[in-house]
């Protein structure tokens, strides 16, 4: 069964801390891995990773994919309270199906 | 403004009463999809569509129907809703090239 597993399930940090969110996947016809941020409403897109070892960066957020070990990490440096959200890891397969992890709930305290 | 719209946003209904949740996008996206989100289970794909008249089952299609007669619309139909379909539903769309999905605001459905 294809699946995406995220860890930790929840995390509490203080502003300024650096966090690493983990995502492992078992998807038979894997194509790409995506990260989304979900605050109170709909998820919003962060990154899409298709190639192994190439870091994608956007401000304080960065992500990398390891297709050999079947995992990805999302790093957030110098966290701010506005980073508090659920971070979703998603796998896209070659048949255009998406598989979502259950998410990591990040709480950044002032 | 580029967006995905869903209606209604909130719906309380009774078991067995057919309902439709509409989804519309104005970005000329080929790909559209429906998800349900439940606590502890994350988002699960119900149905998706690569283009007009092309639909495929996701992980949890039982009890749902969809149609894609026009590129911009992708309604979700519950012919005979049951309480286990109480959930938060999201519609999303993406261009066929990028698969960066844009999500609608969500529809909270309660079936009693």
Image: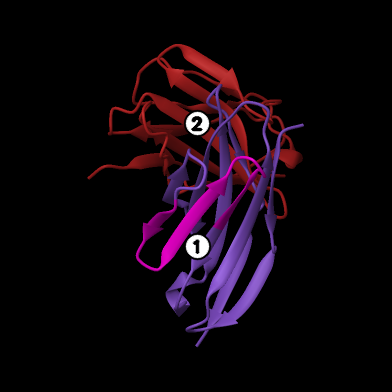
Chain colours: A purple, B red
What residue is rendered at 45% in x and 78% in y?
A78
Chain letter belonging to callout 1: A
Q: Is residue A62 above or below residue B30?
A: below
Q: Position of residue B8 (x, y in %)?
A: 46, 42
Q: Give the number of the disc on residue B33.
A: 2
Q: Secondary structure at mark 1?
A: loop
In this rendering, does residue B110 appear at all? no
What residue is rendered at 58% in x and 49% in y?
A89
Q: Position of residue B66 (x, y in %)?
A: 54, 22
The N terminus of chain B, quarter of image: top left
B83 vs A70, nearest the viewer: A70
Q: Is residue B23 above or below residue A66?
A: above
The C terminus of chain B, quarter of image: top right
Q: Is residue B72 above or below residue A34?
A: above
Q: Position of residue A74 (x, y in %)?
A: 53, 59
Q: Is residue B38 left or right of residue A37?
A: right
Q: Is residue B16 above or below residue B67?
A: below
Mark 1, Cα crowd under 10 Å, few <14 / some 14-19 / many 20+, is few
Magenta span has A76? no
A60 vs B53, nearest the viewer: A60
Residue farthest to the top? B53
Magenta stretch secondary structure, dominant: strand
Residue farthest to the left? B1
Q: Position of residue A39 (x, y in %)?
A: 49, 62
Q: Secondary structure at mark 2?
A: strand
Magenta span has A72? yes
Over which residues does the magenta segment extend?
A55-73
Chain letter belonging to callout 2: B
Q: Give the number of the disc on residue A40.
A: 1
């Amino acid at each position: 069964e294809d699946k995406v597993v995220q860890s930790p399930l929840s995390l509490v940090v203080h502003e300024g801390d650096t966090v690493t969110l983990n995502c492992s996947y078992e998807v038979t016809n894997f194509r790409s891995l995506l990260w989304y941020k979900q605050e109170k409403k709909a998820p919003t897109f962060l990154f899409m990773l298709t190639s192994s070892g190439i870091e994608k960066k956007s401000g304080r957020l960065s992500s990398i994919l390891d297709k050999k070990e079947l995992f990805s990490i999302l790093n957030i440096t110098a966290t701010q309270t506005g980073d508090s959200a659920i971070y979703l890891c998603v796998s896209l397969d070659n048949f255009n199906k998406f598989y979502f992890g259950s998410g990591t709930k990040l709480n950044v305290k002032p | 403004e580029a967006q995905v719209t869903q209606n209604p946003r909130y719906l309380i209904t009774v078991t067995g009463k057919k309902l439709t949740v509409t989804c519309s996008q104005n970005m000329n996206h080929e790909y559209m999809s429906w998800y349900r989100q439940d606590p502890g289970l994350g988002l699960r794909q119900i149905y998706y569509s690569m283009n007009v008249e092309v639909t495929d089952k996701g992980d949890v299609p039982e009890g749902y129907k969809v149609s894609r007669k026009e590129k911009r619309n992708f309604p979700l139909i519950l012919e005979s809703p049951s309480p286990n379909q109480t959930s938060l539903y999201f519609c999303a769309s993406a261009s066929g090239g990028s698969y960066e999905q844009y999500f609608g605001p969500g529809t909270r459905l309660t079936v009693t």
